[in-house]
Image (cartoon, rainbow, N blue to C red):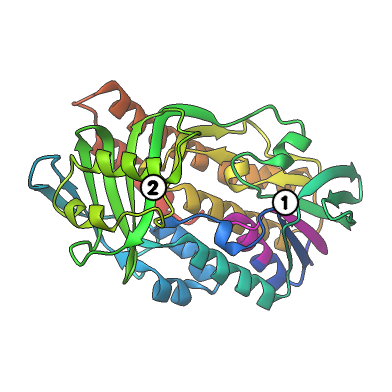
Amino acid sequence: MSAVARVGVIGGGAAGMAAAILLADGGVTVEVVEAKPDLSALGSGITLSGNALRVLRGLGVWEEVRAHGYSFDKVAFRAPDPHGTVLAEVPDARLGGPDLPATTGMYRPDLARILAERARGAGARIRFGVAATGLEQAAAGVELATSDGVTEHYDLVIGADGLHSATRQMLGIDVAPVPTGMGIWRAFTGRPASITHTDLYYGGPCFIAGYCPTGEDSIYAYLVEPAQDRSGVSDDEALAIMRGLAEAYHGPWDDIRPLLSTGSRINYTWFTQHLIPGAWNRGRVVLIGDAAHSCPPTMAQGAAMALEDAAVLAELLLAADTVDDGLWNAFHERRSARVRAVVDASVQLGQWLLDGERDADVPGLIGRLHPKIATPA
């Protein structure tokens, strides 16, 4: 018998929807509240590593993800020279196992739609445009107040509301994302035929210039620069900046630049890192995904760690009879060290770039991390 009969989920991203699906499949009544108004507001492109795909397969959505995304098994490194010269092509690790690709890129709102439809099909109720406004805990559960004036009682509340989590603040957890010193321009646009996998360019005006195919007709392209205040930049200015930075990169970038437009969903964010020390729960409210931890996307593990959080939490809740210290200890034992390893490795890769470290042991760092995350969470 499940330790919970009724669960509230704050946040409708990958972590929140994954938890909703698994718990609803297990017979739990689940309600999700998402502050954003609809699925289209949930970002542009996303890179899913093999260990993320393993969880998506467990959710029963892998075939649909594969149909809507673009999968590949290698990464190439190119020079920031006039030809975009290929320096090396290497097989990417299949972290989800030999029967899943190394990487799948896809349009983030497509992933959000797939997960939301699956959650509804499992019986979860989803309320978009509704924010959490208050939490009151008691021994028997949690009262969750929302912006539509409703207060509901749950046996447990999952805070999966992202980087700037309101749930984390309501719990009084004084941990916040810390900038790492890098900022990233992202654009979502058409896929040139020359792009069939991720290429990474190091050097030039940016720390990293790269792209990931997200479908037969789409990619997201990105340029990583020193973090700057870009908050007042207009759409036209953002387009001009991104095109200007991209002028230094060639090969497939010569095919990308003409496709960039103000309709390319260009956005700019800073890389951050944080990890809640100790327990991620306070009583019967627990944080998962970016609410609990974040790291630069240098290892492409953000979505994977969030999905794994949800899968482990749901597994433990469905197997336990009560929500007690033993359950929380088991959850943190399976998540904390694993996430710490990913955060530390992701931050280290970025710091080496910031420091201009030419002799960094990148293969060694990746070689030490990959066996840890290739093992199911």
Q: Is residue 77 left or right of residue 116?
A: left
Q: Amino acid at mark 1?
A: Ile
* 89, above or below 109, in the image: above
The magenta region covers 5-20
Mark 1, secondary structure of its residue: strand
* Residue situated in front as seen by the camera: 186 or 203: 186
> Which residue appears at 44% of the width and 46% of the height?
235
Mark 2 or mark 1: which is in front? 2
Mark 2, secondary structure of its residue: strand
Badge 2: residue crowd in 10 Å (few <14, some 14–19, many ≥20) = many
> Which residue appears at 61% of the width and 45% of the height?
162
Residue 329 picture location, percent across and down: 68, 42
Residue 308 picture location, percent across and down: 54, 54
Residue 196 picture location, percent across and down: 23, 64
> Which residue appears at 57% of the width and 57% of the height?
41
* Residue situated in front as seen by the camera: 368 or 92: 92
Among numbered discs 2 and 1, the one appearing first in the sequence: 1
> Which residue appears at 72% of the width and 63% of the height?
318
Badge 1: residue crowd in 10 Å (few <14, some 14–19, many ≥20) = many
* Magenta stretch contains residue 18: yes
* Residue situated in front as seen by the camera: 269 or 93: 269
Give residue 188's quadrant in the image. Answer: bottom left
* Magenta stretch contains residue 37: no
Residue indicated by mark 1: 158
Q: Is residue 97 left or right of residue 168?
A: left
Q: Is residue 185 visible?
A: no
- Circle 2/circle 1 CB separation < 8 Å: no
Q: Amino acid at mark 2?
A: Arg
Residue indicated by mark 2: 186
Q: Is residue 222 visible?
A: yes
* 238, above or below 147, in the image: above
